[in-house]
Image: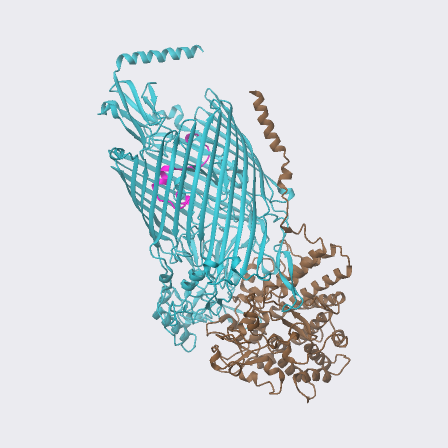
Amino acid sequence: MKRHILHIIMALLVLGATSCDDFLEVDNHTATTEDNFYQTEEDAYAALYAAYNATTDDKGGTNEFEFFLNMCSDDMFTGGGSSSDGTDIRRFEKHKMLATDWQHDQFWWRGYVGIYRANVALEKIPQITFADENEKARILAELKFIRAYIYSNLVRMYENIPLITEPITLADAAVGQANPDDVYEQIATDFLAAIEGLPETVEGEEGRVTKYAAQALLARMYLFYTGFYGQAEMPGVTLSSISSLLDNVIEDNHYGLVDNFANLWLVSGSVEAYYSKEHVYQIPYSYNGKGTSRGDVQFYGLRDLSNTSTYAAGWGFGTIHPNVYAIFDANDERRNATILDANDEVGENGYSNSYQHTGYYFKKFTPLSEFVDDAAFSGHPDGRPVVRYADVLLMAAELSLNGGSFSREAQSYYEEVRVRAGFSTHPPVSLDRVYEERRKEFFGEGLRYWDLLRRGLDVADATITNNYESPFDVTFDRETRGVWPIADVQIQLSSSSAKPLKQNQGY
Amino acid sequence: MKKLKLFFVALLLCNVTGLLAQTLSVAGKVTDDIGSAIPGVNITVKGTTNGVITDVDGNYSIENIASSDILVFSFIGMETQEVLVSNVSNLGALNIVLESGNISLDEVVAVGYGTRKKSSLTAAISSVGKADIEKTQNLRVEQALQGRTAGVTVTSSSAQPGAGMSVRIRGAGTNGNSDPLYIVDGLPVGGIDYLNPSDIESMEILKDAASSSIYGARGANGVVLITTKKGSAGNFTVSYDGYHSFQNPERKLALLDADQYTMFYNEAELNDGVRPTDFNSRANTDWQDEIYNKNAPMMNHSIALNGGTERAKIATGISYFGQEGLVAPDNSNYGRITARVNAETKSHNDKLRTGTSLYYSNIESSGIDVNNIYGGPLASAYNLDPLTPVRDENGEYGVSEYVAQGITNPVGKMEYLHSQTRTDKFVGNMFLEYSILDNLKFKSSYGIDLAYVTWENYNPVYKLSPSDYNLVDDVQKSMNRYFNYNWENVVTYDLDIAKHSVNVVAGSTILEESSHSLWGSGVDITKTPKGKDYAYIDNTLSDKETRNASGGKGIPNRLVSFFSRATYDFDEKYFFSATFRADGSSRFGPDNKFGYFPSFSGGWVLTNEEFASSLKSFTNFIKLRASWGRNGSNHIGNFVYVSNISDAGSYVMGNPITNGTSMQGLAPNTIPTPDIRWETSEQTDIGLDAHFWDSKFTFTFDYYNKLTKDLLLAVKIPGHYGSNSPIDNAAEVRNRGYEFEFGYNDKAGEFSWGANANISFNDNEVTYIGNDEKVLAGATVQTYGLVTRAEEGEPLGYFWGYETDGLFQNQTDIDNMPVSVNENGDIVKMLPDAQPGDVRFIDQNGDGILDDNDKINIGNSNPVYFYGLTLFADWKGFDVSVFMQGAGGHQIANLSRRLDAGLTNLPETMLNRWTGENTSNSEPRATIEDPNKNYSRFSDRYVIDGDYLRIKNLQLGYTFNSKVLSKMKIEHLKLYVAAQNLYTFTNYPGVDVEFGSGTINSGVDTGTYPQARTFTVGMNLRF
C-alpha cells in the first residue's frame, strides 16, 4: 500500500515539476506586441502607414474637418434634408458651436491617435537596422511631417492644446495645454527636420510626401501665425527663410499647374484628378476598401437624385448662396468646375430641394455614379488636395508683397494662376487681389475660413456676419476669435488631473 | 477490546429483552415530496438501536416493536419524521413522505474539491437544492439563484431572449468582470447558458474568502458550484417536464402622441423665437406598439431517464427550449437543445469509482442592439416622432422629416436585420477515484469545454433615411472554436480518532483556454433571387477586391495551481479549516506571474456544549463562524503588460482609382502597463447559524468586509494620450455589509406552509485610486458627456453631475443668480442665457461660474439593500408559491433620449412643463435650442431612484394523488400555472428598473429591452 502512495506522490511531483514557468510562457504566434514588433524594415513601414492612416481619419464623426471649415466660412450653408437634419453641423455655420457637439471630441482624439502613432514610431524606428539608412531617415522625416501636419490642424482648430512629442505613459497624466507659440515652434522644428530627410519626388509611391509639401505647409503656417497673432514672424521661421523655402518649390520645377482647372476634380473623369504635377500634397482615399474612404462627399450630393450617368445621390448639404456664385466672372473657368447649378445640370424635378435651398451645390467633390454603381463601392474616393501648386504661387505672391525675396515678381505668380482660369488681362497684384483669387481658386477646399481669420477679427467678422434673412443668417462670434470649443468630454476626462484642460474663451 | 465485547453483550441483551416484550411489525414505503422512492432511509425505534433501512424501491419492514414506540425516519438532506406507532391505523402500509429540507443539519453540501456536512461548515456557503429550483419556473440557471439567498444579487439588464444575467456575490469588487466563477461538476466553465435548469441537482454559492479561496486566482467574485443530476440506484424512471408560455412587455414608456408632440414643439419654437413649423402630421404612430411582438411564445420540453444499480448508475436527458423575443420576433429569439449523459461505476472491490458526464448544447440565437442610444430598433422606437407613418402612401417605410442621426423607422430596421449566432457546445468531464486506503483517496479528473460558434450577418439593400441606407448588399460569416481543458489531481485523507476528526485535501490543476477564429465577407449577392436565404459568401461577387477573409489563433490563457486544505473537528463542537493556493497565470508579466491565496476559518457549535442542553426545546442548533481569506482575479486580456500592436487602418500607395495598393498600418492600440499584477481581495466574515423549535425557524446572519486591492481597471484617459483605455491595477474597493436569512416551515394536518426571506445590505466604497487625481472616469454618453466616475471615498461608479434647485420662476430669480467678474472686469451671470422656466443649476463652490467644479455625486447605481421573499403553502396536492424580489437605495440615470437627433419624441412627463410663473418647478419650459442647457447638462434631473419590488413569480400547482396515479403506472404528475414579472412596484419611469450594477459604468439607461410578463402552463410527469 505504501508503494501506491509513493506512486501518487511521485505523479503529483512530476506534474508540479513540468516546469510551471514554461507552461506559463505562452507562445505568441498571432498577437503582435511591442516586444516582437519594431524589429524589421517591414515593421517600420507598417508603423509609418499607421501614421499616414491617421491623416485620412481626421474626421468629426463622418466628415473631414475641411467640411466644417467650409460651413464656418462664408462659402457654404448647411442645407441637408430639413431644419432638424444636421443640427450640430448647422451650429458650425451659425458660429454657435457647443462644447458638447461630438465633432470636437472626435477631432481631438483622432488627432492625438495620429500623434501617438508618430511619437511611438519616432522612438522605436531609430533602433531598427535598415539596408539603406537613407530610407530610415526618410521614414523618420515622414513621421515628423505627419506630426507637424496634425498639430497644424489641431492648433488652428482649438489653439490651446497639449503638446506631446514622446510616447506618453500613464504616469504622465498632467500634460496640460501648451502655449500656442510652443506648438508653432514644434511645427516649424518638425517641418524643417522633415525637409532634410524627404525626397524631391515620389514617383510610383504617390501618397508619400515630398520635401516640397513640407516647405509649402510651413509657409501656410507662417502666414496663419503671423496674420492671426499679428506677429512679424513665426517662432523658428523668418520671413526670409520661409520665402526662400517657398521660392525653392517653384524654382526646382517639379510642379506646375494643370492646363484645365476642371481636370483637377474626379467629376471631369481626367487622370489628372488624382496625382498630377499640380498636387504638392494630396491625401488619398479609396472607393473599394483599399484605404479609408472620404466622408463628406456623400453630404455634398444632390438629394433623391436618380443616378445620372455622372452624378449619384447625396444628402444635399453645403448649399451655396447666389451671391457667392456671383463672385465668379462668367468667363472664369473655375465657376462651373466649382459650383453645380443643379437646376441647369439635372433640372428642377430631377432632385429634392435641400433645406436652405439655393439650387447651387458644391461640384469639386460630389458623389459620382462611376464609383457608387460599382459593386465594390465602399465609399467615395475623392482625394483631399491639401496643397496645390496654385496655392504655392499665391502664397509666394503674398509673401513677396510682404517683402519676401523671390526669384520672380509677385505679379507673375498671380497671373500664372489667372491665366489658367481663363483670363487674359490682369489687374496689378495687391494683397486684396491675392485673397480674392485664393477664394475663387480654393473654394470649398477648406482654406477660406482660416484665410479669413488670419486677416484679423474685423475682416473675419465683417465677411462672415451677413444680413441675410433666416435661415441664411450668420453672426460671427468675436468673443471666440473663431477658435472652436474644446470638447466637454475631454475637459471632464482631464478635470481631475493636476493640469485640467481649460475651455476656450467664449464657450 | 474488552469494552467492545461488553458493548456487543449489551446489544444482545437489549434485543433479547425486546424480543420478550414486543410483537408488532410495521411495513411501508418512503418517498420524497414529489413521490419518488428513497432508498437507504434509516428507520429506528427511538431510544433503541433497533433499526432497518429502506430498499431500492423505498420499501421497508421493521419488526419487534411495541405500540408505545416511536419510529424515527431519517435521511440525509431530508427532514426527520417521528411517528408514534399507536397512532398508525394501517401498520402494513405506513407510507411516509419525507420533506426535502434545506434546513436539515445533516445535509451534505459541496465545497471546493469535496463535500462537508452543512452543520460543520466554517465558511459562508449558501445552497440551493433541487426542491427550490423546481418550486419556480426558471428560464435560465441564474434565475434559480435569484432572490434565494442573501448576498447574491441576480439581475437581468436585458430581457432579450438568450441575454445573460448579472450575478453578483457580495457586491462588486472588480471592474473587469464581476461574474462569479462557475464550476459545473468540478469543471470550471465560461458561462452556464448551455445548461438546462431542470438538469440541476444543487447549487452551492461560496460567498466568503474562506470557502472560495481554494479557487484562488479566480474566486474573488465568489464561486458557484453546480452539481447536475446523477443517476441513482433503483428502477429506471422516465420523467417529462414541459411548459408553454406567452410573453408580453411588462411596461411601455409613456411618450407623446402626435397632437401632444406638435403642440410641445410648436410651443418650444415660439419660446425660441422661431416661426412655428407647420408639422406634417401624416400619422399618429405608437412605435412601441409597432415593434412589440404580442403574446410571444416560449416553451420548454425535457425528458430524462434515471436509474441503475449500486455499481452502475446512469442519468440521461434531452431538452428543448425556445423563446421568441418581445421585439422583432424574426430577429430576437433563442432556441436551445441539450442532451446529457451522466454515468458512474464502482468496481475493483468498490475501491475504484469512475464517472463520466457529457453535455451537449446547440443554441441558435439572434438579437438586436439593446441599451444602445445609437442603434437598434429600441432606441428608434423611443425617439422617433409619432408623425411618421410606418409606411408612406407608396408603401415604403416612412421616413421621418423631423428626426435624424441614425434614429430611423424601427419597423423597417427590424426587417433589415439578419444576424444569427449558432453555438455547438460540448462539456465533458471524466474522473477516476481510487481508494488507496479506506481513508485515503486519489482522484484525477479531466474535463473539456469545447464550443463552436458560427455567426452570420446579412445586410440587404435598403434605404430608411438619408443617413441609414445600404446600396450594395453584403454578407459576413465567422466561425470560432473555443477549447478549454482542465486536469485536476487531488488526494484526500481522513482521520478520525475518538472525538478528533481530520480531513486533508491536496492537489494541483492545470488549465488552458485557447481559440481559433475565421472570418469572411463578400458583397453584392449576384444570384437571383436575392435575399436572406441566399445570403452566403459563395453567392456574392467573386472578386479578389471584395471577398475578404481573416483568421487566427487566440493567445492561450494558462493557469497552473497548487492547493491544499486541512480541516479539523473536535466532537462536532469546534471546527477549524485552513486553505492555501498558489496560482500562476500566463497573463501577467514575468515578475508577476504567481499569486498566493491563503485562508483560515473556525466555527463553534454552542448547542453541542453541555451547558446548552437545557435549551434544546427552544434552539437545537447555534453555530458561530469566523473566517479570513484572500482571493484573486485575472480577468484581463493577454499581453496587456506590453502594448498590443493592432490593425491601424491602411493607406493607399499610388493612384487609388487605377493601380493603387493598400498598405496595412500597424500601431499600438493602448499604452502599456508593464507592472500589471494580480487583483487580490481580502475578506473577513463573521457569521451565525441558528435553528429554533426543532428547525421550524432558521436564521443565518453574516457580516463581511471585503477589500479588493490592485483592482484591474480599464483606465479612461483623456483623448490627448491618443490611446484606448489601458488596463491597470488602479484602485481599491471595499464592500462590506450584513446578510440575514430567515426560514420558517410549519404544518397542520395536511396543510403546510412556510416562508423564506433574505435581505442583504452592502456598502460599496472606493478606498484608494492610484493616480494623482484620485479619480477614474467611467461611462460617457454622447451629448451628455461623462456621467459616471469613481473617486476615493465614494461608491464605485457614482453619477457625477450638476445638482439642480428647481426652475427660475421669474425675472427676480434670474436677477438673483450667482455672478462672477471676468477678465475685463465685467459682471457675468452664472447662467447668462437663462430665462424664467429654465433650470436653476447649483453653484456648489460659490465662485459664480458653472463648470465641472460644480459637479458632485448625484446618485449611486449600487443598491444599498437587496431582498427576496418566498411564500409557499401546500394542501392536499395543491401548492402555491410567490416569489418577490426587490432592491433599494440606488439610482438609475435615465438617458434614453437622444438630444442630437432633431425633434425626437419625448416622455409624457414633459407635458408638465413650465408655462408661466409657478406652473412647474421640475419640468423646464419647452425649448429646442436649449440655451441654458437644461437638457444637455447632466444633472440630478436625470438621476432617478431605482427602488423596486417585483413579483417575479407566482405559481399554482396541483399534484395528483399517487394512489390514483399508481393504477395508471404513473409515479408522479403535477400540473401548474405560473406568472412571471406579474407586477413591479417602482417610481422609475424607464422601460425596466432592473439594472445590473457593480461596475464603474453601471446604471445608465439608454433604452433597454422591456421585461416580459409571462403566463405559463406546465406539467411534470414521471413514470
Q: Colour of chain B?
A: cyan
Judging depth in this view, the residue of B761 and A209 nearest the camera is A209
Q: Position of residue B303 (x, y in %)?
A: 37, 40
State which quarter of the image contains the N terminus of chain B. top left
Task: Identify whether B504 is placed above or below B808.
Answer: above
Residue B134 lies in the magenta stretch: yes
What colouring method underlies this structural image? by chain
Q: Position of residue B942 (x, y in %)?
A: 43, 60
Task: Identify whether B1011 is placed above or below A184.
Answer: above
How many tags in the picture? Answer: 0
**B974 lies left or right of A243:** left
On the image, which quarter does residue A127 sit in? bottom right
- Residue most toward the left? B89
Can residue B941 be seen in this snapshot?
no
Q: Which residues are magenta?
A: B118-144
Judging depth in this view, the residue of B847 and B470 nearest the camera is B470
Chain drawn brown, letter?
Answer: A
Judging depth in this view, the residue of B875 and B646 nearest the camera is B646
- Residue most toward the front? B528
Can residue B126 be seen in this snapshot?
yes
Q: Position of residue B856 (x, y in %)?
A: 49, 58
On the image, which quarter does residue A243 sit in? bottom right
Residue B600 lies in the magenta stretch: no
Q: Position of residue A52 (x, y in %)?
A: 65, 63
State which quarter of the image contains the C terminus of chain B. top left
**B754 lies left or right of B411:** left
